Image (tube, rainbow, N blue to C red):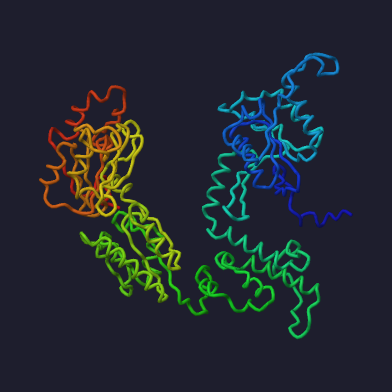
Amino acid sequence: MHHPSTHAMFPEVQDGASLLLAFHARPQTAVLILGGDQLAATRAFSALEANYEVVIMAPRSCASVCEELAWRADHAQLTIVDSESGTPRKGDSPNNTPVTSEEHDAHALGSYLDAHLSVRLVFVTDTVLGGGTPTPRRNRASAEKIYGMCRARRVPVNVTDMPDLCDFTLPSAHRMPGTPLQLAVTTNGQGCRLGARIRRELVARLPHDAGTAVKRVGELRRLARAEGEADDEHHTTTPNRPVPQRNLTGEETDAERSARRMRWVAQISEYWSYSHLSNLTKEGMENILSGDGLGVPSESARCDIGKSSRHGLSVAPSSHRGAIFLVGSGPGHPGLLTVATHDVLTKQANLVLSDKLVPEAVLDLIPKSVDIRIARKFPGNAEGAQQEMMEAAVDAASRGLTVVRLKQGDPTVYGRVGEEILYFRERGYESVVVPGISSALAGPVLAGIPITQRGAAESFIVCTGVGRQGQDVVLPGYERTRTLIILMGVARIGQVLETLLTPHTAGRRDGPPYPAHTPIAIIERASMPDQRVITSTLTHITTALESNGSQRPPGMIVVGWSVLSLWASGDVTILNKGAEQEDESRIERWLGGQSWRVIEGFIGGWERV
């Protein structure tokens, strides 16, 4: 019956959308893919993860498929069939006329679909634009015939790069590893790459434990239905739908029990934090569903109350178990701290265990009520001091304190963070790593040196000048197109230079020696007010360093033609053909006829920030 007065109450239909579905494979259902390229392998992987049987149809069978498909076929993950099982010949058509290759492919597909009714979806990937496939791109006429064969049999088909021959499209999808959670974004054909970007940004904003939370809720729902209750969660439009008050004095009927358990699952899914959900145990689930555990959160839940929600009110006692953060303080200037690092230092820390190179300007940000201890990593005591700091962190955490292990730069760039993660994990603490801006990246920038620069440096490599327990390290050989960044090497500058310059180094250099006139910069105390940059060539850098007073640790070494590429009017012709012949004049212009140059303070106006 038509009610004109109620028309405005309902949303207006706007066409152009897709009907987004999530297919669940049933036993003995298959996906058929025409093509053997890498896109076919991607489609096959997605179908396999969805529990479909996968059939690849390609000419010459395994001979024309990519390496991944061949490997999966060898391991019985999918089946490859030959689309050329019969060559085109007279007699294949009713009027005895020759059959074209396009018609033959369509007939081969039709015959297969007629003989294998388990095929539910067809993908055609050998129409992809751009080439690079094992076989030539399928033409439009062939794709149209294949599309017609599928349509005649009511099998949905997707033909790559031909939108009008697609019954369905695939969104840009992401699956959280090891969990049931998948996210998908579609732009309805208006911008696939933009859709992929949006998907990446959504994934980046997703709580890290959301996938585990979904997994635990799935277990909770299965437990709730273990005795045959109806799944009422899908029919609950809101978790606040009225439910009869539970009868605590009498027995529940099956219907009441079913409604209670599934609606409690809906409530939990809507309001509990991801962290609490991801930490649910089977015992906790049983308590929740029985009602015995709803009012008494587990230990992990009590830690979460009032902490993970910005709107929460902490009313439960804090946990007796502390936490450990492994935090990067950046290159030194407090303005280069990340927001996350600043928050941890100023709002959460009870104890800060700091490396000695973290500058006072950063330590001054920490509230006076927070205990700060500086690592005693003096020469010859590095290993002992490291052990001392790790033991102190565990001791403080066991007393319920929040411990911040503060490191220079980024903790994962020669910060020994891996040792500490494993040490704390072995003792029952899963530490939280907070990245920092690495001095390997920031230091050269603040010295006016780009680590990559079109026309001067196409790549860079970061290494250390000293190995574990003082052992020698293998340094990379010379490549004109590459910038070499050496951390913790200034104290061994003589040994570093010998390794770089000597023709034969007994395995201490991987590649050819460096030309003696290669530009080099030593950057000391990058980002701090007393920053100093000494630039020269490999020949003269030792003299330059010794002639300019005491060293200012921490220091780093930058080697390569990017060192001079932005000086004055710049030089981005270094990688031009035959540019090597002008190196001597290039060096002379850069250093102004001197053997080295020393620059005190910031370069490029950083002091104004």
- Taking depth in this image into account, of 310 and 133 the one nearest to the observer is 133
Residue 497 in the image, given as x and y percentages of width and height: 20, 40
Q: Residue furthest bottom?
A: 249
What residue do we see at 78% from left, 14% from top? 98
**Compared with residue 557, is residue 108 higher up or lower down, i.e. above or below?**
above
Q: Residue furthest right?
A: 1
**Compared with residue 582, is residue 217 higher up or lower down, i.e. above or below?**
below
Number of callouts in the render?
A: 0
- Taking depth in this image into account, of 39 and 7 the one nearest to the observer is 39
**Compared with residue 413, is residue 61 higher up or lower down, i.e. above or below?**
above
Residue 82 in the image, given as x and y percentages of width and height: 70, 28
Residue 183 in the image, given as x and y percentages of width and height: 61, 51
Residue 554 in the image, given as x and y percentages of width and height: 23, 53
What residue do we see at 69% from left, 71% from top? 264
| Res. 578 image quadrant | top left
Quarter of the image containing the N terminus?
bottom right
Left or right: where does residue 520 sit relative to residue 462? left
